[in-house]
Every structure is written in structure tokens, then in C-alpha cells.
Image (cartoon, rainbow, N blue to C red):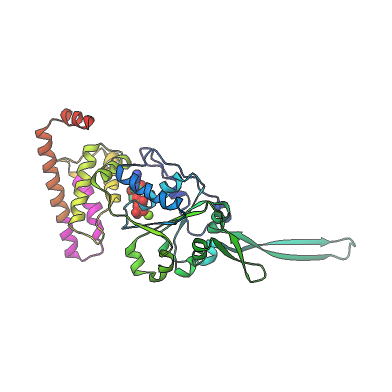
Amino acid sequence: MANGNGCGLAAVDEASSGLASASELAAVSVEAGDCFVATPEVRRLAERALVYLNAGYPVHFSGPAGTGKTTLALHVAALRGRPVSLMHGDDEFGSSDLVGGEYGYRKSKLVDNFIHSVLRTEETMNTLWADNRLTLACKTGDTLVYDEFTRSRPEANNALLSVLEERLLTVPTRRGGDGFLEVHPEFRAIFTSNPEEYAGVHRTQDALVDRFITIRIEHYDRETEVEITRAKGGIGRDEAEVIVDIVRDLRRMRVSKQGPSLRASIMIGRVMSQEGAHPRQGDAFFGEICRDVLGGLTAKITRDGERGITSTVDEVVAKHLKEERRDKKRRPFSEVAVARKGG
Ligand SMILES: Nc1ncnc2c1ncn2[C@@H]1O[C@H](COP(=O)(O)OP(=O)(O)O)[C@@H](O)[C@H]1O
Ligand SMILES: [Mg+2]
């Protein structure tokens, strides 16, 4: 998928379906795109994850929605330079969705019409085994990115236990027993999850969590959020700063359970650049976008609450636009630009 300013997120979107069909199973190739923002904070996280992977441990990025976990997982996977397989957790998954299963059958028909008056046909049917993503990744030594793995039921994820511990994958055999597949030495796995979902939905994934190194991901620092909003929203740095400051303020005020994320900043930025709107006093559209994107976060709460959040958003937006105006008055734009170039 490409957005208006040519940022590619191909790998994230290409393999987004839950159960992969056989033709879909080819590993996605992930390359660090032009729009991947690597500030010191992002780089530090990526380097740490890479060290753990090199030491043979699976890595788990755990954090609230919109903190950049999936993007980081794909980036780290790409840094390993091996093919990348992407899988998304799904409540409907069974173990065959990870390992593989008998998905279809081959029918062969023999028609014997040697004697005109006699037609003899013979049909045989064989079931066809199709490997799924985990099996393929284990065979070819891919880096598996298992996004939101806690959304799958623990039973479906069981196959991973022996893969991570004994480096053996259990696969059912034709005769109904179990066979083993030795995992390729280069196979590594990166998991992501949101602890909110983990706590509420699938408590018994602990055995799995024990086997990997978990890196807690919080919302990025201001600098990283500004850079990502600028790059992904296709807007200027000054504008990205105003948006990010508004979003971070509302997050601090805990207007919703996990707070507005980076995703909200990018959303506002993108709509603004599309419409040529600007975060400045007198631009009514900017306030409206903020109200829709940020006020919508609490759409689930009561009417009174909704009215509350709308006016909170309005107040925070007005405060930041006022500050922005004051800053601009103090320093003319050209000066701001020069100062930025210098540092
Ligand atoms: N380092 C980064 N560089 C560029 N864009 C990023 C980066 N990290 C996150 N993003 C963007 O921020 C948004 C949220 O990131 P995502 O990885 O989907 O978060 P999560 O998986 O934690 O919900 C996405 O639009 C993504 O493209
Ligand atoms: Mg994600």
C-alpha cells in the first residue's frame, strides 16, 4: 500500500489475511522503506532485538496499540537479511493454520472404453497436504513475524512451544501419528502483542511468553513521533510538532484507555496535507479534523462523556495553536528554519 507521499508499507499489508492459501504462502520480502524513521530511540530498540535474535532467542514486542510494534518487528526482521514470513494472530486459528493441513484432494479418473458397449470408470482420491506459514518458515529458515499472536487461541499456538524450545516442529503424518521436522538453524521468530488484549483474552499463553525475551514498547519520545508524523503524514516539521504536542497532551490527560497514539497524529497529518489545511489559528478545518480523529476515540462512552471529550480536544487544540502563534511571533519563520538546519 502506498500513501499520498509514496511511503510504502507493502509488507504490512500484503499478507494481512489470517489463513494463508497455498499460493499466498511465499515469504514476503521486506525491505526498509524510505519512510522508515530511525531515530536514536528506534535504533536502540532495533539493535537490542537483533542482539537477542542473534543469540538464538525469539523477541517479543509488547505494548499499547499504535506504538510502532509491527513496523519495528518488520524492520528488525528485514535487518536479518533472511526471507520474512508474516502471520497475524486470529481467534479462528487452529493449529493447522500454523502448521498445515489436508486442504484439498487430488482426483484421478481412469476411463476405460476399450469395448464400445462397456464403459468402465475408476476414480481415486488422495488428500493433499499443504504446509502453512510456520512450517514453511521452519523449513527455509525465515524470520517469522507473528503479529498480535495473543489473538490466536493458546491451543493454536502450541506448535510453537517445541519449535522454540527443542527446535522441532511436530507435524501430523498420513498414518495419523506425529512426525517431526527439524527447524532450520537460521529460523527466528519475532512476536508482537498488546498486553491489554493479552490480559483479557488469552491468559494461558504464559508458557510461550516464558520462551522469548520481551521488550516493552511505550509510546515513542516526542522527537520520534514528530519525525514519523512528518514522514508518514507528508507535512512540514512545524506542523508535525503542533499535532504531536496536542496528541501527547491528550494522552497525558488519559482521555481514553490507552490514549491517542501515533496513528492519530499520522491520520491528522495526512488529512491536512491532502486538504492543504494548516494547524494555525483561524483554520477552522484543523480543529474539525482534530475533533473527529481525537474525539472519536471515546465514541463508546456516554453522551455526556462524549461532550466532555470534544470540549477537552477543543481546549487542547486552542492552547497549542495559541502557543504556536506566540512562537512564530517571537521568531520569524526564516529564523526558525535556520535554527533547525544548524541543529
Ligand atoms: N519507525 C517508524 N517509521 C515510520 N513509521 C512508523 C514507525 N513506527 C511506526 N510507524 C507508523 O505508525 C503507525 C503505527 O505503527 P504500527 O507499527 O502499526 O503500531 P502497532 O503495531 O504498535 O499498533 C503506522 O502507520 C506506522 O507506519
Ligand atoms: Mg500492530
Q: Residue drawn at (33%, 46%), measured in percent from left and top?
A: 44
Residue 207: quadrant of the picture: bottom left
- Residue 108 magenta: no
Quadrant placement of the C terminus: top left
Q: Residue drawn at (70%, 64%), measured in percent from left and top?
A: 126
Residue 225, image x and y in percent? 27, 46
Residue 195, image x and y in percent? 33, 63
- Residue 302 magenta: yes
Residue 200: quadrant of the picture: bottom left
Left or right: where 189 falls relative to 195: right
Left or right: where 142 falls relative to 107: left
Looking at the rendering, the stretch of residues picked out in magenta corresponds to 285-311
Residue 165, image x and y in percent? 49, 63
* Viewer can see residue 136: yes
Quadrant placement of the N terminus: top left
* Viewer can see residue 285: no
Outermost residue on the front side: it is: 55
